[in-house]
Amino acid sequence: MYRYDEFDERFVRERVAQFRDQVARRLDGSITEDEFKPLRLKNGVYLQLHAYMLRIAIPYGTLSSKQLRQLALIGERYDRGYGHFTTRQNLQFNWPKLRDVPEILDLLADVEMHCIQTSGNCIRNVTADHFAGVAQDEIEDPRPTAELIRQWSSLHPEFDYLPRKFKIAVTGAEHDRAVIKAHDIGLRLRRHPDTHEVSYEVSVGGGLGRTPMIGKVVRDYLPKDDLLAFLEAIMRVYNLEGRRDNKYKARVKILVHEIGVEEFRRRVEEEFARLDGPSVNADPAEVARIAAYFKAPDYEALPAISRVLEATKAANPAFARWVEVNTIPHKAPGYAALTISLKPVGEAPGDATSDQMRLVADLAEQYSQAEIRVTHAQNLVLPYVRQRDLFAIWQRLGEAGLASANIGLITDIISCPGLDYCALATARSIPIAQAIQHRFADDNRQKAIGELNIKISGCINACGHHHVGHIGILGLEKRGIESYQITLGGDATENAAIGEILGPGLAAEDVPDAIERIVNVYLSERAEGESFIENVRRIGLAPFKAAFQEVAHAVA
């Protein structure tokens, strides 16, 4: 993991001291809320429906055991004993008191964490594949790139007041687990077919919200050494020409759409040629210094398949099922990457109590090189687990309610906080997720359905990524009543697609019935081995729309 140097440490401590003074002046009335707002947003503090909310940056979703324990302590001491992991791999506390925030920031600084770049019109926390460094399909670990961008973009003076927020994601694998095509800039490490050198495919103009768009490729193979200069060229074109007259049209995706990707590409290449690349791009020695923090741990020499694991699976079907669903093959023989579900049936998706955080921190320390990953799907990962240790971990997770075997299945629902917390939300999303989870709680039924991603947003801002869910659910307010629009066919992977609306909005109580009708169409129409999204692509929306309309007409 990356470790702070002397500059990082001083920078974060100075920011804490500045914000402590700003909070004191707000509390004694020296500055108004309007004057305070831009200051608090630069430090991750939002004012939500019921209280302030503090959003903590977890760069590229990587945490140490020590950091997770500190988050547990903060949740217990200054919040209500839990935290909420988000789709940007961050963590939110929903109930801190403003007077306590400087103390919280000090505690975060003690473990090399902060809240900078988690809000406001800046380059936000850079996200990455949560299986970085361990996935078998990976060409190169994307975390050094993400860390380089974090350092380059932190308080970059030219990009401190962008037209709107700006999001960057990086993956180093064939299979996109970082949703890069739904980001303002998406980077994919790939090997050039002729030179075989690792380079970047650069996509621009993706994004969700009220105008969902899939990112367009503006460079197929960008040499790694040119990364920062090329990113700076993109940011300059956006900063100069992006709209500022309408906040809903101020994202780079709107600029790309309005002038066309060819013209956008031409302007970026022109700006890139004008820049003095060597003065912008990172010193190779610095790149090497950053990369050294992410070198693989010293793995034990183990057989590819653990006999201990196989024997334990044979004796424990529930454990075998959990291993099948919640682990992936690892680069290192005898190891596995394990995903811990934060979606037990009936709980708020992405929430973890302080006790659960401490348990995961302990397990990571004992079994996974003291490292944890946060996924954009609001789960946690132990990336370096010996196969023979999986049973012991499963038992301890089970005691804490964290052993659900549902990763990628219908109850592994992404959900924003919705109207229970968020000041922007127009409908609740957590109760919808819980109702669907209860409807499909049976493990055998989930297994029969197979991979199916449901994503729920409580407003058009789409923090729950509903546009790219196989089934997307968008909560809206309609004449004072919460109404839920359902979309189908979205995809967050390398085959990125925006879902299409099935019909009129439904009342909350009718949503589980509609989901069940949709799933039944799939089960009756699927071919051998065909997943839900493959089935939707093959047979089209018509049969699903017909089933949906039966529910819509029945309740009309």
Image: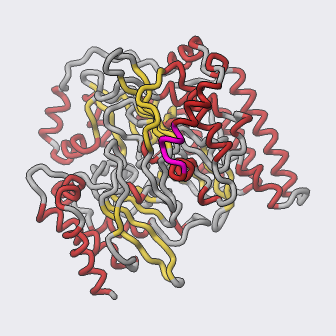
Residue at the extreme right of the image, as rendered: 30
Expressed as whole percent of the image width and height from the top left, the position of residue 481 reads 49, 82
Q: Which one is nearer the viewer's eye here, 262 or 287?
A: 262
- Quarter occupied by residue 106: top right
Q: Is residue 40 magenta?
A: no
Residue at image position (32%, 17%) is: 194
Residue at image position (22%, 72%) is: 517
Expressed as whole percent of the image width and height from the top left, the position of residue 9 reads 70, 27
Q: Is residue 262 magenta?
A: yes
Q: Is residue 368 above or below residue 422?
A: above
Residue 357 visible (yes or no): yes
Residue at image position (15%, 32%) is: 310
Expressed as whole percent of the image width and height from the top left, the position of residue 408 reads 30, 49
Query: Where is the C terminus found, in terms of image quarters?
Result: bottom left
Q: Which one is nearer the viewer's eye here, 323 or 545?
A: 545
Residue at image position (62%, 38%) is: 235
Which color mode does the image show?
secondary structure
Q: Which one is nearer the viewer's eye here, 373 or 497?
A: 497
- Quarter occupied by residue 474: bottom left
Instruction: Indicate left or right for 154 with 189 as reference.
Output: right
Expressed as whole percent of the image width and height from the top left, the position of residue 369 reads 43, 25
Magenta part of the protein: which range?
Answer: 259-265
Principal secondary structure, stretch drawn in magenta: helix
Q: Is residue 320 above or below residue 513?
A: above
Q: Which one is nearer the viewer's eye here, 328 or 425?
A: 425
Q: Is residue 286 above or below residue 28?
A: above
